[in-house]
Image (tube, rainbow, N blue to C red):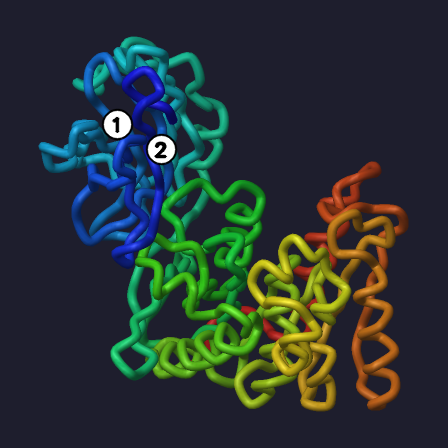
């Protein structure tokens, strides 16, 4: 963003290990830090040059949250949080020119979005155009167990963020089957305190049937935990992340209420790839896996994503090979469900066909469901989403029986 009639501009850099905003003069090119502190600026929401304010989203002490801050454009003030301190969760803002008011969208893990119009900087609510009242009412009538955010140590001083959804009638003296929901790629986090939509509702259904549902963010996800956290997976997508997930799972299986004989894992897209990597690389941990629309060979995926994080295949052949689930199919021991839309416009169906051939070559038993002409979302056509999630539920219940054991 240009400032001061085009003689200065704002610049985002990770030069000090954190994603910060700097003000740079065209005269000397020297950057002035305007968001000081050991935290990441997640996004810039507005620049109010007349008022001398920069508005941004951050969460200095908790990577699962998203709050609005402002700081002086001249760098002479400490960042000031504008989001109310009692409102844990994810906050998004569409700030009007002049920054005197904004559309504010708020949600949390089990709370659907509400949209307010708020004054800034006071955050006073002017009106609430979107309440989602019907959905809130329906959710309040459901049996819901506790949801807890936690950190798990995986060694060498590394802690990963996670969440767990408990059955409504949870009894800590009993042992429950556990389902890990994974993604683990640089494109997104699963461990966020925000509304999860249909995935949340399906996970809620599973808890009602007696499953413990858990998700953990490995290193390399875009959590606001600094440059080193995010870039550690460079040139080793699928390698370090799967090791982190396995270490977290081993620690979690030590919880006294987890049944280590009933461990499942599932994911979609990059999470589907992670599911395969975990089932193939760590068969001693997981008995059942459900992989939806996975990248099975990194050489098949689009260059703008894969080469951004892996480099060129000609320069990182070992990384592309070792990070691809298809390389490790011989390790499969448990139950595997593979799901893909034949019209996938993102992760092409070729990816699953290649994996099927590799599994056949190794004489591995598996189950596959192809959705004709469905894209990466597998939503097109009447009843498709319901069919998919009922398929996942049946497969899980068949191979990982629900409910507590003594």
Q: Is residue 87 above or below residue 399?
A: above
Which residue is more in the foreground, 199 or 125? 125
Which residue is more in the foreground, 120 or 237? 237
Cα distance in 3D space between marks 2 and 1: 8 Å
Residue under numbered circle 2: 44
Secondary-structure class at tag 2: strand
The answer, for residue 35, to whether it is visible in the render is yes
Return the mark for residue 54.
1
Crowd rating for badge 1 (residues with CA inside 10 Å; few <14, some 14–19, many 20+): many
Secondary-structure class at tag 1: strand
Give the residue displayed 43% in from the left and 64% down from the top.
231
Give the residue displayed 57% in from the left and 86% down from the top.
282
Which residue is more in the foreground, 225 or 201? 225
Give the residue displayed 61% in from the left and 82% down from the top.
287
The answer, for residue 125, to whether it is visible in the render is no
Among the two numbered marks 2 and 1 on one chain, the one whose residue lies closer to the N terminus = 2
Image coords of residue 295 (percent x, y)? 71, 65
């Amino acid at each position: 963003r240009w400032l001061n009639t085009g003689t200065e501009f704002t610049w985002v850099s990770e030069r000090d290990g954190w994603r910060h905003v700097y003000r740079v003069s065209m005269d000397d090119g020297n950057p002035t830090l305007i968001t000081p502190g050991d935290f990441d600026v997640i996004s810039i929401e507005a620049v109010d040059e007349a008022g001398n304010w920069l508005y941004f989203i951050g969460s200095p002490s908790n990577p699962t949250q998203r709050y609005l801050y402002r700081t002086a454009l001249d760098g002479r003030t400490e960042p000031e949080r504008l989001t109310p301190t009692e409102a844990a969760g994810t906050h998004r803002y569409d700030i009007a020119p002049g920054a005197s008011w904004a559309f504010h969208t708020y949600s949390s893990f089990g709370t659907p979005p509400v949209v307010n119009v708020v004054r800034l900087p006071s955050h006073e609510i002017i009106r609430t155009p979107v309440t989602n009242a019907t959905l809130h009412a329906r959710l309040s009538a459901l049996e819901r167990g506790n949801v807890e955010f936690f950190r798990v140590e995986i060694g060498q001083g590394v802690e990963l963020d996670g969440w767990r959804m408990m059955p409504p009638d949870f009894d800590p003296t009993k042992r429950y089957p556990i389902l890990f929901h994974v993604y683990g790629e640089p494109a997104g986090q699963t461990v966020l305190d925000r509304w999860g939509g249909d995935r949340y509702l399906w996970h809620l259904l599973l808890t009602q049937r007696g499953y413990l549902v858990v998700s953990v963010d490995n290193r390399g996800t875009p959590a606001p935990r600094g440059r080193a956290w995010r870039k550690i997976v460079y040139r080793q997508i699928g390698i370090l992340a799967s090791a982190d997930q396995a270490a977290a799972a081993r620690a979690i299986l030590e919880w006294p209420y987890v049944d280590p004989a009933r461990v499942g894992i599932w994911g979609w897209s990059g999470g589907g790839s992670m599911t395969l990597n975990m089932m193939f690389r760590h068969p001693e941990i997981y008995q059942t896996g459900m992989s939806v629309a996975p990248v099975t060979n990194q050489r098949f995926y689009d260059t703008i994503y894969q080469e951004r994080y892996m480099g060129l295949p000609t320069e990182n052949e070992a990384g592309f090979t070792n990070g691809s689930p298809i390389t490790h199919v011989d390790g499969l021991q448990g139950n595997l469900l593979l799901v893909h839309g034949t019209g996938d416009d993102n992760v092409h169906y070729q990816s699953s066909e290649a994996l099927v051939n590799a599994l056949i070559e190794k004489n591995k038993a598996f189950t596959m469901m192809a959705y004709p002409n469905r894209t990466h979302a597998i939503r097109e056509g009447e009843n498709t989403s319901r069919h998919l999630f009922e398929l996942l539920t049946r497969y899980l219940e068949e191979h990982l029986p629900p409910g507590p054991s003594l």
